[in-house]
Amino acid sequence: MAKGVMIVAEQRDGALRKISFELAATARKLADQSGDEVSAILLGAGVEGLAAELGKYGVDKVFVGDNAALEPYVTEAHAAVAAKIIKDNDPAIVLFGASVQGKDLSARVAAKLATGLATDCTDVKIDGGKLVCTRPMYAGKCFGEVVIDAMPQIASLRPNVFPAAENAKAGAVTKVDAAVEAQKSKILEVQKDTSGKVDLTEANVIVSGGRGMKGPEGYAILEELAEVLKGTVGASRAAVDAGWRPQKDQVGQTGKVVSPNLYIACGISGAIQHLAGMSSSKCIVAINKDAEAPIFTKADYGVVDDLFKVVPELTAVCKKLVA
Amino acid sequence: MNIIACVKQVPDTEAQIKVKADGSGIEEGQIKWVMNPYDEFGVEEALKLKEKNGGDVTIVSVGPARAMETIRTALAMGADKGVHICDPAFDNADAYVIANALAAVIKTLPHDIIFCGQRAIDDDAGQVGAMLAEALGLPQLTLVTKLEFAGASVKVIRPIEGAQLSIETALPCIVTAQKGLNEPRYASLPGIMKAKKKPVDVKNAAALGIPTDAKAKVAKTIPPPARPPGKIVCGDDPAQKAAELGRLLREEAKAI
């Protein structure tokens, strides 16, 4: 019978990504309820050394698939190896990160195993022996409780939502056969973003600007505030469609759905498709001249004033606070 | 070139979503239905490929009777024909069922490249493209923002967290479209007139011969958790308000 919780760890350039620890800690919590084991799949080239780190966050056993063909990530190769490890070990639950790679991989693996998948979950629990996954739909305008009527039950977890608590276990390595067929896809180039900014979906702090920024130059004051708070700058659809900010900065139903600790919305009126994309943020601040703007209905703290005056003052205040 | 674009009809992004009192789904009464915005990018890219390289574009959609409007919209944009998979048996379908339904149709059609949206903005699952690729045994390129066609292969750009990948894949393959890929065209009036006469084949579940039982089931739909009412930060001038906001974020919210 299917048993235990398995995670699919994510590493890039020889380092585990934060979501891997969030997965490990969450899997540990689920497995402890039934006294089961937590195992992990770790794929790449020369990655065996990372297993101990997974152990630190509660993983008992790590299946390491080591093969140069698994680096960098290619969907079909990773999916073939991961699906085989899952089949051979028959876990009841498999958790992926709802990162770009995790979403790409989890759907392919679920299809290979002819099972169901709950994407981008913000809560998972065991109820009556079954996994119940809570996940936002319509970008958070409502939520669904999803159950999976097949084995294994697969879910991907939204980054930044589940705590990565340490809970040391063995992290014992089992090497597995990671041979793959010749791939039809070839990575030609990996062009790294050298700005050093954290992606919006993984940022702890987001300083976001909308139409009220009046133009691309307006964002300089948001960049300064984000710099002080070690955050990332986001934008509304209006700002992206106007060409003020790149597409990757867009927060909302047709952009990124984010859940930082702190979301500071500047000059954003709060169209419903924007509110949907950021309302799961832990603390929301709105700075806007218009006291009637819908963004204030979602804000924990509202400042009704000229953002071009408030933001530089706030930057100065924050500089002192974090010093 | 034989090009397929898969589309889904979804509520408009401006739609208010109300959960039914019994948690069995959402109230559909007031909703304006549109083509999923990410599918529009897929249809536009399909049309651009056809205009440059010749061939035809087939639209495939799974959905209730009203989804025909969305298929007609894609035909009005310039696609050539459609297949509408329409059966109440698909009302509670998950991505696995939908992907297999699409695959059952696409297997019977010549296909060099297949476009899907990277996700639908209703259930936000983002699974169909990858599951369709698996069902057809084809490589998948998800979240594509740029595509170049090079005869027997395509080169694409795909953003990931903190980087951009440039990938080359042999055809046939599945591409899921991300915002940034193109600017979808509007249907012209002559386009709308012509679309009415373009062929759309309607198929039910029995005709496809596939199982329709969802693996992932939404047991309950719930409204988002209510946020406690917020505070308006007081102060005589921007400097005072900023100081007070900083204090609240530090001491009360512990957010900085």
Image (cartoon, coloured by chain):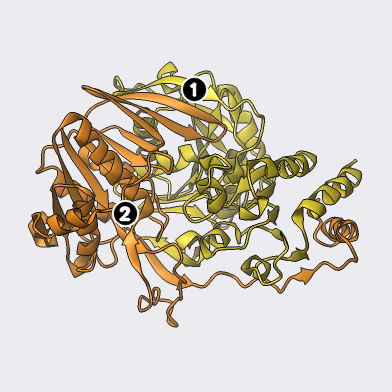
Chain colours: A yellow, B orange
Q: Secondary structure at mark 1?
A: strand
The chain ID associated with circle 1 is A
Decide: is B153 above or below B222.
Answer: above
Image position of B179 (left or right of A275): left
Q: Which residue is mark 2?
A: B95
The chain ID associated with circle 2 is B
Image position of B66 (left or right of B20): left
> At which x and y percent is residue A139?
49, 59
Q: Which mark is residue A24?
A: none
Point 26% across, 67% down: residue: B91
Image position of A303 (left or right of B52): right
Q: Is residue B27 visible?
A: yes
Q: Residue A107 is drawn in which quadrant?
A: top left
Q: Quadrant of the C terminus of chain A?
A: top right
Q: Which mark is residue A190?
A: 1
> At which x and y percent is residue B18?
46, 76
Q: Marks 2 and 1, how far apart in space?
A: 30 Å
The amino acid at mark 1 is Val
